[in-house]
Image (tube, coloured by chain):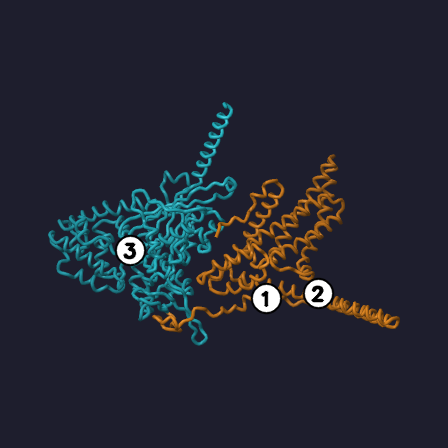
Chain colours: A cyan, B orange
Amino acid sequence: MVNSKAKQWLDATTAFAERSVRKAVERAHSSHVRLGVTGLSGSGKTVFTTALAHALLHARNEPTMLAFLGALHKGQIVAANTEPLPGLPRFPVEDNARRLASSQPHWPEPTHELSGVRIVVRFRAGGLWRNLGLEPELRVDIVDYPGEWLVDLPLLGSDYRAWSLKTWHDLAQGDGTTTPGPAAEWCASADAIPAPSGLDARAAEYRRLLAQLKGDRFGWSWLTPGRCLTWTEAGWLASGCAFFPVPPEALAPGPLAAALSQRYASYLDRHVKPFYRDHLRNLDRQIVLVDLLGALARGRDSVLGMRRALGAILAHFRYGSWARLLRPLLGRRIGRVMVAAAKADLVTRSQHLALRSLLRETVQWSAMRKLEDADQVAQDRTLYAIGYLASVRSTTERYRTEDGVQYAGLLGRPKGYTADKVLRTSEVPPALPSAEDWPADGFIYRQFEPPNLSSYKERAFPHIGLDKAIEFLIGDKVS
Amino acid sequence: MSEERGPKPGFYEPHEFSSEPAAPTLVPSLVAEPPPPPRRRYGRWFAYLALAFFGAVLAYDAARFLWSLFAFSFVAGAAATALLAAALVMGAIWIGNEIRMLRALDVADRIRAATGALRNDTGHGAAAEWIARIAPAVRSNAAAREGMSRLREMLSDVHTNAEAIALLEREVVEPLDRQASGAIARAARDTAIGVAASPVAILDAVIGIVRALRMIRAIATIYGLRPGTFASIRLFKRALLDGASFATADIAGDAWTEVLGGLGSRLTGFVSARLGEGVFAAVRMTRLGLTTMQACRPIPFAGDQRLSAMRHELFKQSFAGLIPGARRAAPAETRSPG
């Protein structure tokens, strides 16, 4: 009797010790990645996050959909699930995926508020630990935010006076190219230097101007403050930080400059700094989504503006990876960054190489220009990749032969159409054409509605290059 | 900006386009190998002429023999003629088969050249054509067949040729590599033991050559080449050269024994020399196996890094064979359920 009890106690203790050791080793092998999905408004951040989470959740159902995810094909990925991120509203992965895979599919709504999701991937440890059957976890935290918020980052390095001078100059003179009419009109209006009682009225006008410039015709997505467009006009005015640029002569010390400077500082302190500190500063991995095709379709000014915005935004991220032990002391840094031309399904596959080439030129002009310096790359120990992807592929290719030459078009349902059409797009230029060489009819690329994805509820959506992006961003953490 | 050709940018009705692309044109430069440098083949012509002469002598003798048999007895003559005819027919079939096998080796060479060229190609479509050509050759191998069916599901029209070749390598060729590595590890182990146990140099060479021949044939069969005798001989050329080195190792081993013997530990010297020869033979066999893999693989190895990875795999497999229970740790077909 006593023997039996002792044996039970011994067994229980042994099992407990084994569980504890296993858990401790698994915890030591688990890792936590903060993945920054970066992109201007309309670059496809929400669709990317949805497609990535949906792909990982259902990866095991049909591994062939993610051909280049190495760990999946070695049988290492065991399970995946999503969790809310502490302190943030839950990013609606399931709702977005359900909408995409419904009988009347549509893209997720543009993001207006901050939300987050944690993707937990359980995988089999490799190497020496393989035989112990350990299943550590990889937790991938992704925060989704309106792209407009990102363009405010450059404000952190400037004060109201400098911002106003620069913005006024841009609006009045343009970006060295053509000046959009509404901006010049706004600058030339009679109340360019408003009375103290007219600040809110002028701020409301400025907000309407930004909304107009952000439209398809101009696409000046880099104009600040970006947040004012994600709020209603009343909300923006009630926030107490509705500021706008004034002519240089109005910046002399006085009540107007003081009031606007105070609003500017309040905007930074209450909105921009906390967002940057909590969600952007401590990233481990980053994907920068660039809607090059959309910018090309809008015009040369739009590409130049986007290039400028990217340059200013990317300068605020910290690249280079510390040794693991030093991270708690020195803070996190981005060890891998992928810059991807988003929506690659809006051109035929033969254009992808040119798209990547154009993207390379675009980012080399921006903060990534340090890539040109090989020593710098070795020093900051960051892996960079340039690619193209379509998180959810909305078109398929169709072909037509004329005079013995085969030409490809894109079959899909264009936005605003009820039936499928084939679109022949413009050829993507491998480098940005000069203003003289810009085609008279512009570049023709169109947005498409999502296709019928009802058979993809339990497997990754059709995509272009999403698997390669996942492999690059987190592949090393699950193998 | 270059002037855009073809249908103008804009919307078209779906029926104006077709769903299937025209078959991609396989660029001739990918297919054709560089022509060999011109050589004067006096030796080969001598062999052909000598063979023709002795063949004629044999034919003359055979005809005289049959004639004499017919003179002796019609039945005996007819039986001998039928026997000769049957032998000739079988010989013709055998030669035809061998020629077919040799041509298969040439086709394999062309495929390898093409897939090697496509490895860094950013175009589309051509890799799928070559994959379709490889598929029948590896159909008899269960792992490759399974990999090929997975590959077909994975391949999409947006994959570049380089991506398609990378997937082909991972899904189809790497399982075959693992099987070939196993064959090499077994051959290396057998040779090491055989050479260490054999008492004379000539036996080392025989063991080396025979085991190398079997290994080469096994590797070629794994990659779907199923070589006949002549095709094997082409692959064996290197084996014969390698066989010669086994004997050299034996002589070198004796010299080592003399040195150690002079120091007073003749037995230790003898044992260590035999083991050294065995290890040397195993290493040569492994190198020969890797060379054979290179010659049989539908995709050429990409640089030294790949070869070193294969060597690592081989040593791991050999290690797994030496330690009981370690084989389970060797790479298994761990694949998540589809």
In the picture shown, does residue A88 fall above or below A221?
above
Alpha carbon distance from label 3 to label 2: 72 Å
Q: Is mark 2 on a helix, strand or loop?
A: helix
Question: Which is closer to the viewer, label 1 or label 3?
Answer: 3
Horizontal side of A468 relative to A98 (left or right) equals right
Which residue in the structure is indicated by mark 3? A110
Which residue ends up furthest to the front in the rendered image? A1
In the rendered image, residues at marks 1 and 3 fall on the same chain: no
Q: Which of A152 and A403 is in front in this view?
A: A403
Asked if residue A290 lies left or right of residue B115, the reply is left
Q: Which amino acid does label 3 sit on?
A: Pro
- Tell me whether the residue at label 3 lies in contact with that at label 2, contact meaning CB atoms closer than 8 angstroms: no
Residue B247 seen by the camera: no
Q: Mark 2 = which residue?
A: B94
Residue furthest to the right: B72
The kind of secondary structure element at disc 3 is: loop
Image position of B169 with respect to B198: above or below: below
**Residue most extreme to the top:** A2
Q: Work out how far the residue at label 2 is from the one at label 1, CA to CA, in angstroms.
A: 31 Å
Is label 2 or label 1 in front? 2
Q: Which residue corresponds to mark 1? A: B34
Q: Mark 2 lies on which chain?
A: B
Host chain of mark 3: A
Is residue A157 at least partly visible in the picture? yes
Viewed as shown, does residue A213 lie left or right of A96? left
Q: Quadrant of residue A84?
A: top left
Which one is earlier in the sequence, the residue at label 2 or at label 1?
1
**Disc 1 on helix, strand or loop?**
loop
